[in-house]
Each structure stands twice: as C-alpha cells, then as structure tokens.
Image (spheres, coloured by chain):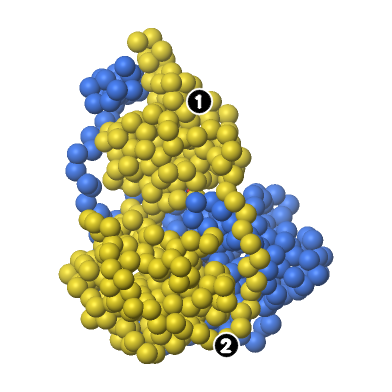
Chain colours: A yellow, B blue
C-alpha cells in the first residue's frame, strides 16, 4: 500500500507532529511519501520522497492553492491513502481533496483495527470502525493517537513542486494566544471547572477546593468561552497543556481536546454525574456525584484535616 | 444579502447511549434532542449580521426526519426568516458527503452570499459537511472561525489554531464559514419571538437519495475502559472520606 503523508508548517515553523503521520504509515505497513508546503531550511526527518512547495510563495493557509499542489502530487504518486492531521490545517484541506478525488474521507482516526480505521462518536462515548468503498481514501488522524517510540530519522529526497493556481482567501497574519498571568504548566495541583458547574456563581466552589489543596484552578473551554474563567486558565488543545501531580476535573465530560491538555497528569480525579463520561478513560478515580453537592463537602473535610 | 445556515439536530451528549439493533449507529429511542452546539453559533452570527446590515434573508436548513423541525423552530425563534427541511428519515446513517450533496443541490441556484455551518457535529464529528458544500458549489470556505466581521463586502474572520493562536483571514462572498465554539454568545429565544417563529415559513422538500455510499460502518461499539480507574459511588460525605484516603495513599497532594 502507498500513502501520502501531509505535514504542516505554521507560524514560521515545521510542526513536529509529522512523526505521528510516519508512525501511522508504519503501523499500516505502508510505503510513504510526504507533502509539505514549507521551507527547505527546515526539513522533516524522513526517509523517502518529500514533495516540497515553498511556503514563501504559497502561504501557510491558502486552501485553493495547497489543494492544487496536493492534487498534482496525488496524480503523480497515486497513493491509496492520503493522511492528514485532524488539525486546523487538516480538517480544512482534507474534505477538499476528498471531493476532488471522489474518495471517502474518514475523520479523526484514533486506531486501526483489522486494517480498518476507528473513529470516535458522540464526544468519544462510542467508537465506529469504517470500511472505505473508494479506491483512494482520505484520513485525518486524531492528535496524539499514533506515536513513534523513537524520534524520526532520515533525510528526505526533496522534489520541488509548483503551481500557478491563485488563492481565494487572504491570510494576513496571526494573533498570539493570550497567555499572560498564571503559569499552569508548573502547578502541582489543578482543580478544573467544567460546564457541569452549571452557573458562574458555582465556580467559587472550584476556587475553594484549589485553595485548600494549595493549587490553582483551571477550566474547560465552554466555561472560558462563557467568561466564567479567564482564558489563560483554559486546559486543552487550544489552551494550556498541563502535567500536575493531581488534576481534579469537576463536571468535565472529557472531550478529546480537553484530554489532550491534561491526560499526562500523574493522578486524575473526575467528579461527574454521568458514569459513561469519557473522562473515565483517563481518570484514576471517578467519583460519581453532583459537583455542587460534593465539592463543598470535600473542601470542608480537607480544611478540617 | 442571502444567507443559509445549516444546522443539525443531535442528542444531548449526556444521554445514556445504546447501540442500535443493526449495530451501526446509536439507538435513537429515548434520547433528548437539541441543536448541535456549533450550529448555535452559526445561527447567532447570521442573525447578528442581519441586525448589522438590515437587508438580509436568513434561511435555516436541516436534513433529517420530521422531529428536526422542533430544533429548526429554535433557529427561527432566534431570528432566522424561514426554514427548509430536507426530509430524510435515514439522515443519521448518511456519510458527510451525502449530506453535503443534498445541501449543495438545494443551494446551487439560490445565490447564497454566505453559508454558515458548524465546524463539526457533536455526534458524527466529521468536520466535513461545511467544506464539502463549498467544494461542491465551487466557492470559498474558511473553517473554525472564532471571530467574524463584515464590512462593505469584505468578510474578515479569525481562524482558531492549535494552542489558541488565531489566523487573520479575509475573503469575499460567496463563502462557506464553519463556526467554532466561542464565536459569539448565542441568544436565548424570547417568548414573543418563539410565538412569531410559529408563523414563519417552513418548507419541507423530499431528499433525493440515490447516492451510492463511499464508506460504511463496519462496527459500532463502546470503547473499553483503559483499566485501573476506580469508580466511587455513594453519598457525598462518604465519597469525600474515600477520596481523601486515596489522595493520601496515592498522591503527595495532602502532604
Ligand atoms: C478544535 C477544537 C478545540 C477545542 N479546544 C478545547 C480546549 O482547549 N479545551 C477544552 O476544554 N475544550 C476544547 N474544545 C471543546 C471540547 O470539544 C468540548 O466541547 C469541551 O471540552 C466540553 O467542556 P465540558 O466538559 O466542560 O462540557 P460538557 O461536554 O458539556 O460536559 C459537562 C459534563 O458535566 C457533567 N455534569 C453535568 N452536571 C453535573 C453535575 N451537577 N455534577 C457533576 N457533573 C455534572 C456532565 O455529565 C458532562 O460530562 C475544543 C473543540 C474543538 C472542536
Ligand atoms: N443533517 C444535517 N442537516 C443540516 N446540516 C448539517 C447536517 N449534518 C451536518 N450539518 C452541518 O455540517 C456541520 C459539520 O457536520 P459534520 O461534518 O457532521 O461534523 C454541522 O455543524 C452542520 O452545520
């Protein structure tokens, strides 16, 4: 089998996650080539052909142009699978390629079972294994689902590619994430608030528990989006990645984007009314309880220790 | 301006799910249904745009069985002008390409300036339908928007990237925009608007469904819990004592 791996370049840098694409190809036992709109000064470590377009000419986000560059390579290589990250670049470009190739697209692959991709359903509560019926298949891989034991190595043989297609959108720059203030990356205990807290006044319960544990509080995204907690305390793919000794998730379902930010914590406690909540997949202790009743009791008992 | 908003009806994610008899999707019985969270942002943004420009016509579209009209009414109560229901009892089984094809076929001759969709649906979660609609219509698409501004024909959006930084992107109509969480704060429909929504036009059209699937579900199941996790149940004081004991034994947090 032949795969084409689509690596990424963003905010002036090669995204090192490309090693996950290689790990995936290895798991499939597939022969692979790589595609990148990037820079010759920063090449991925990879033994194989790298089709490289110059990011200075074609931009980091320029879907119509990247699509054409990629379609030209696909026409030449004839890969059976085209593999993207399930990322802001991948989920934007992959469906464009799937439509052009009349190929099945399978999104957010978390594993391969009997040669077939597995994807999450319903906020990762369920799983689905999919059979593609088309000669070519477009896949996007969940961040972190595939990994290599060692750092990638090798030197690609670079094939420079070009196109005269023009874009239909203009990406004029970037706005940095707001990170000023608290640094959760070095905190030993984090108590995080999720939507299960119900209303902004209840966030005080999370503050109180964090305080008796001499830790900091964090939050899931909806709690931050709603303005109950500041953005610099958001945990997850679009917030902070943390590795405290103790992480307590209060009323947080455990969506993949949240887990990505906290699953490497040493000890994880989940407090949730829904026993099937996917946070259970990473929790060392799962307390089935209403946070609004449980947190005040726990905090008081800890105070009296 | 002519605007289309695509919404999906999904179960409440806190529901107790069961695998259906065919073993290829969840059982739809006994679930509470609501608007896909991402699509609420899409509806809100369209309504705000209409409030800004004055002259705009908002069509909300949903593919699904009859029951989706309940969810569409919410979009009408939020401020959409009319509903188009593509009646399809099997929509839950259809792959994103099939859904996108139905929507694109409807939209093709209607000259929509902007098509808003959610970035993904909460149940299927493919993040494909929006971009596929754009590709089938051969128009631009920008995904994962967290900010939107319209000024005299120019659409400026911010796309959210990993780590929380944003890309500043400008584009002109016609365009599909896929909406990310936090784009705005969706309004709650007021009672007068809920009443008014009942009188708004709701057109039902039959789904053309001869599409040959490009993929199919081979297995559908609950994931295995990665072992080791302890589940505690009981009343709060008892649970708190057990948890404190575990924290003492297993972590240095109480030292
Ligand atoms: C591209 C992208 C990036 C994202 N980035 C992030 C990110 O960085 N961080 C992030 O967190 N999310 C992120 N998300 C959103 C993510 O997918 C989820 O929507 C979000 O994490 C859900 O937050 P939550 O668990 O607080 O809310 P919900 O999913 O609504 O879960 C609430 C939980 O609380 C429980 N509950 C309800 N009431 C109670 C009660 N009284 N007591 C106890 N438990 C209760 C429920 O059972 C449920 O499990 C991102 C999504 C996308 C698409
Ligand atoms: N059945 C449907 N009817 C209308 N719009 C839909 C439907 N399914 C998906 N969409 C739209 O496409 C977006 C992405 O869905 P998905 O590709 O399933 O993740 C959703 O947020 C909706 O805006």
Question: If you read the primary sequence from the N terminus, does the residue marked by circle 2 or circle 1 appear first?
Answer: 2
Q: x, y percentage for residue B62?
A: 54, 70
- Looking at the image, is A224 positioned above or below residue B18? above
Q: Quadrant location of residue B97?
A: bottom left
- Dot 2: chain letter: A
Image height check: is A148 above or below A64?
above
The quarter of the picture where the C terminus of chain B appears is top left
Q: Is residue A64 left or right of residue B172?
A: left
**Where residue A290 sits in the image (x, y, percent)?**
40, 31
Q: Nearer the viewer, residue A21 or B247?
A: A21
- Residue A119 visible, this angle: no
B64 sits left or right of A177 in the view = left
Residue A23 lies in what quarter of the image? bottom left
Identify which residue is drawn at 56% across, 76% down. A58
Q: Pointer 2: residues within 10 angstroms few (<14), some, or many (20+)? A: few
The dot on residue A160 is none
Q: Under tag 2, what secondary structure?
A: loop
Q: For the point 50% across and 46% down, which residue is it?
A: A239
User: Whole-Å distance between the Cαs marked 2 and 1?
Assistant: 56 Å
Q: Position of residue A302 (x, y in %)?
A: 37, 15
Left or right, A114 with respect to B234, comes to: left
Q: Are marks 2 and 1 on the same chain?
A: yes
Relative to B241, say whether B28 is above or below: below
The chain letter under disc 1 is: A
Label annotation for residue A207: 1
Identify residue for label 2: A164
Q: Nearer the viewer, residue A50 or A272?
A: A50
- Report the front residue among A260 and B137: A260
Residue B229 seen in render: yes
* Residue name at image x 53 percent, y 62 percent: A12
């Amino acid at each position: 089998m032949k795969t084409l791996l689509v690596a990424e370049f963003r905010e002036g840098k090669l995204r090192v996650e490309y090693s996950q694409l290689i790990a995936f190809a290895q798991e499939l036992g597939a022969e692979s080539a790589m595609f990148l709109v990037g820079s010759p000064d920063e090449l991925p470590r990879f033994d194989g052909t790298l089709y490289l377009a110059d990011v200075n000419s074609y931009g980091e986000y320029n879907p119509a142009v990247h699509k054409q560059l990629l379609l030209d390579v696909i026409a030449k290589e004839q890969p059976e699978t085209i593999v993207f990250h399930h990322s802001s670049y991948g989920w934007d470009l992959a469906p464009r390629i799937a439509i052009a190739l009349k190929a099945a697209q399978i999104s957010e692959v978390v594993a391969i079972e009997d040669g077939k991709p597995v994807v999450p359903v319903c906020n990762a509560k369920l799983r689905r294994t999919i059979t593609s019926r088309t000669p070519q298949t477009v896949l996007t891989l969940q961040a972190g689902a595939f990994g290599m034991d060692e750092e990638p190595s090798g030197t690609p043989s670079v094939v420079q590619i070009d196109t005269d297609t023009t874009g239909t959108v203009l990406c004029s720059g970037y706005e940095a994430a707001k990170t000023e203030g608290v640094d959760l990356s070095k905190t030993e205990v984090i108590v995080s608030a999720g939507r299960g807290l119900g209303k902004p006044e209840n966030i005080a319960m999370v503050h109180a528990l964090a305080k008796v544990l001499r830790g900091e509080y964090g939050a899931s995204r909806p709690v931050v989006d709603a303005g109950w907690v500041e953005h610099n305390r958001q945990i997850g793919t679009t917030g902070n990645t943390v590795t405290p000794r103790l992480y307590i998730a209060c009323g947080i379902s455990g969506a993949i984007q949240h887990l990505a930010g906290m699953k490497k914590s040493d000890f994880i406690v989940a407090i949730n009314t829904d026993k099937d909540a996917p946070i259970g997949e990473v929790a060392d202790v799962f307390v089935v309880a209403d946070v609004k009743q449980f947190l005040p009791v726990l905090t008081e008992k800890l105070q009296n220790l | 301006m002519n605007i289309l908003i695509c919404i999906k009806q999904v179960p409440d994610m806190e529901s107790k799910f069961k695998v259906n008899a065919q073993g290829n999707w969840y059982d739809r019985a006994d679930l509470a249904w609501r608007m896909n969270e991402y699509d609420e942002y899409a509806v809100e943004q369209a309504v705000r745009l209409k409030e800004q420009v004055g002259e705009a016509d908002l069509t909300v579209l949903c593919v699904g069985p009859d029951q989706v009209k309940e969810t569409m009414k919410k979009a009408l109560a939020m401020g959409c002008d009319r509903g188009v229901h593509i009646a399809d009892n099997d929509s839950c089984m259809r792959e994103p390409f099939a859904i996108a094809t139905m929507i694109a076929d409807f939209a093709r001759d209607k000259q929509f300036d902007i098509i808003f969709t959610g970035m993904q649906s909460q149940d299927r979660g493919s993040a494909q339908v929006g971009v596929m609609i754009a590709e089938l219509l051969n128009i631009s698409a920008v995904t994962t928007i967290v900010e939107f501004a319209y000024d005299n024909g120019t659409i400026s959006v911010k796309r959210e990237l990993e780590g929380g930084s944003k890309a500043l992107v400008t584009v002109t109509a016609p365009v599909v925009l896929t909406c990310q969480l936090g784009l705005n704060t969706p309004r709650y429909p007021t009672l007068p608007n809920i009443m008014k929504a009942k009188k708004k036009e709701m057109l039902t059209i039959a789904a053309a469904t001869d599409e040959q699937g490009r993929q199919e579900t081979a297995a559908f199941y609950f994931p295995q819990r990665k072992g080791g996790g302890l589940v505690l149940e009981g009343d709060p004081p008892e649970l708190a004592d057990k948890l404190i004991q575990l924290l003492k034994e297993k972590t240095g947090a109480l030292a």
